[in-house]
Image: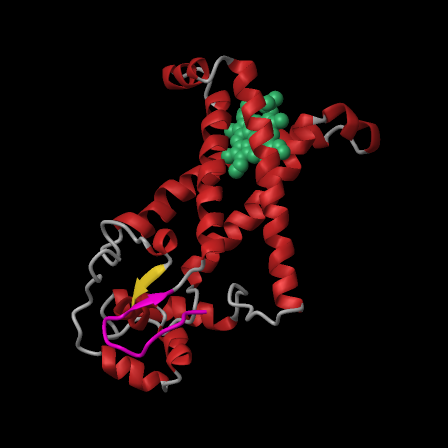
Amino acid sequence: MVTSEPKESARLRRFGTYRIVEHYFIMITFSILVLTGLSQKFHEFELSNWIIIKLGGIDMARLIHRYTGLVLAAATAQHLAVASIGLVFRKWPASMVINAKDFTDAIDNIKYYFGVTNSPALCDRYDYKQKFEYWGVVVGGVLMIFTGLILWFPTLVARYLPGELIPAAKATHTNEALLAFLVIIIWHIYNSIFSPEVFPLDTSIFTGGISRERMAHEHPVELARAEGKPLEEIIAGHHGETYKIAEGD
Ligand code: HEM
């Protein structure tokens, strides 16, 4: 939840240390897994050979991949445990849950981008694009962990479950890896670096801070709640401002 002083162009706190550390963690583990996994998948490329040799050979690349996979599994389990405890016992708002408004927000933004309306969708703490990315990472991560473990222990799995599961896990793991890599490169990097709304970099997940101006533009519903103001006042205050990123944001 954003905490704020109701001042124009103030900087607000959007993320706490825990979320910042989690993001660094997933950035690093995902990069290592992509590097060591895709260089095995595309082993015929010069670049893959170069990466594998620099890592100390194929055995070392496989070892790094598997143990980084275990680290990802532990991080995913703690994330889901903390989220469940927070939602059930500490009554955290379920801000990542997909709801009907996300669909109407997407339609509102399409109208805005085509110039049919003058203002973008009025989103809450996370918009539909952020929810799409979040659930992609969670669901994709769980899939990668299960299929990765099947590939790691094929004989153990085949002792209890149908053997067909092993080639199926291989196809899922390798294709989902490529899909996740492309989604991150094309979608996530665009949204956090190249999108004109944040260029040259959306630093909020690294510093925890965001400008009030961006909050009014991108998350007006949350800002209204944080400042205890009616939504109309937030929109009216923002109306006519040239959208600009605050220094260092
Ligand atoms: C987002 C995370 C991950 C990505 C992007 C990824 C990517 C890949 C890729 C591209 C391959 C090569 C498949 C091929 O040869 O076609 C692979 C293999 C493999 N992965 Fe992953 N992976 C991820 C997570 C995991 C996890 C969590 C585990 C284990 C818990 C794991 C264990 C394995 C194993 C055992 C193999 C077979 C290669 C070997 O024997 O080392 N992976 N991975």
- Asked if residue 116 lies left or right of residue 63, the reply is left
| Residue 81 in magenta stretch | no
Q: Position of residue 40 (x, y in %)?
A: 50, 21
Residue visible at 41% across and 69% down in the picture: 2
Q: Position of residue 175 (x, y in %)?
A: 52, 34
Q: Quadrant of ligand 1?
A: top right
Q: Main secondary structure of the magenta part?
A: loop
Name the residue nearer the viewer: 21 or 61: 21
Where 129 sits versus 32, above or below?
Answer: below
Evaluate whether residue 176 shows in this view. no
| Residue 11 in magenta stretch | yes
Q: Position of residue 62 (x, y in %)?
A: 56, 21
For the magenta stretch, what is the residue range? 1-13
**Which of the 4 image quarters holds residue 212?**
bottom left
Evaluate whether residue 54 shows in this view. yes
Pick out the residue farthest to the right. Answer: 160
Picture mark count: 0
Residue visible at 32% across and 51% down in the picture: 192
Residue visible at 66% across and 68% down in the picture: 88
Q: Position of residue 132 (x, y in %)?
A: 47, 56
